[in-house]
Image (tube, rainbow, N blue to C red):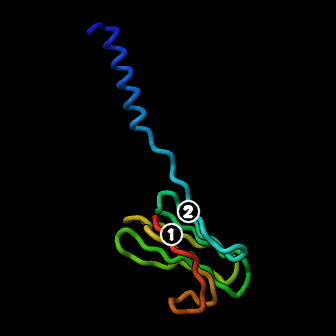
Amino acid sequence: MSNRLRRFSMAVLTSALIVAASPAQAATDWQDGYAGVGRVTISGGHKDILLCDTKADRFRVGVEYSTSIGRRLTLQTGPGVGCVSDSIFLGSVTAAKFCYGRSLARGGVRSCNAQAWF
């Protein structure tokens, strides 16, 4: 094999490795909520959760979520304007649903949006 062909082959191989090793385009964040009440954002990597109550009223907002290691958790805030956050260190968020109402306890007076699966 000639030096010229060898250099060309190495350049093609190096370019292919660089493309293969480049990080994939970042996943987009997932958001849900209810207009004028609150919203939840889960990072594209499914590790970080931000929940905000956007209206000073008598309602609470919350997010129920499940993780890949089998935990089922609820994060809530309100009544009143404010935000809370959580991070997942082991595993990731696999499902989540946004809820709002006077009581966010299961069986309480609340409404929930459809559950999303990741």
Secondary structure at badge 1 equals: strand
Measured in 3D between alpha carbons, the distance from the residue under mark 2 to the one under mark 1, in whole angstroms, is 9 Å
**Residue type at tag 2:** Trp
Left or right: 56, with 32 as reference point = right
Q: Dot 1: few (<14), some (14–19), or many (≥20) neighbours within 10 Å?
A: few
x, y percentage for residue 115?
A: 51, 74
Residue 18 spot, x, y in % from top left: 41, 32
- For label 2, the SS is strand
At x 55%, y 55%, the residue is: 28
Q: Nearer the viewer, residue 118 or 57?
A: 118
From the image, tell me which residue sits under label 1. Answer: 116
Q: Amino acid at mark 1?
A: Ala
Query: Which one is closest to the eye, mark 2 or mark 1?
Result: 1
Disc marking residue 30: 2
- Taking the spot 56% from the left edge, 62% from the top edge, the residue there is 30
Q: Quadrant of the N terminus?
A: top left
Residue 100 shown left or right of residue 26 in the figure: right
Tell me whether circle 2 and circle 1 mark residues in contact (CB < 8 Å): yes
Determine the image quadrant of residue 114.
bottom right
Quadrant location of the C terminus? bottom left
**What is the quadrant of residue 92 in the picture?**
bottom left
The image shows residue 53, relative to residue 17, as above or below, that is: below
Residue 14: which disc?
none
Q: Residue at x 50, y 77 (%)?
A: 64
Q: Nearer the viewer, residue 96 or 88?
A: 96
Residue pushed farthest left? Answer: 1
Residue 83 image point, x, y percent: 63, 72
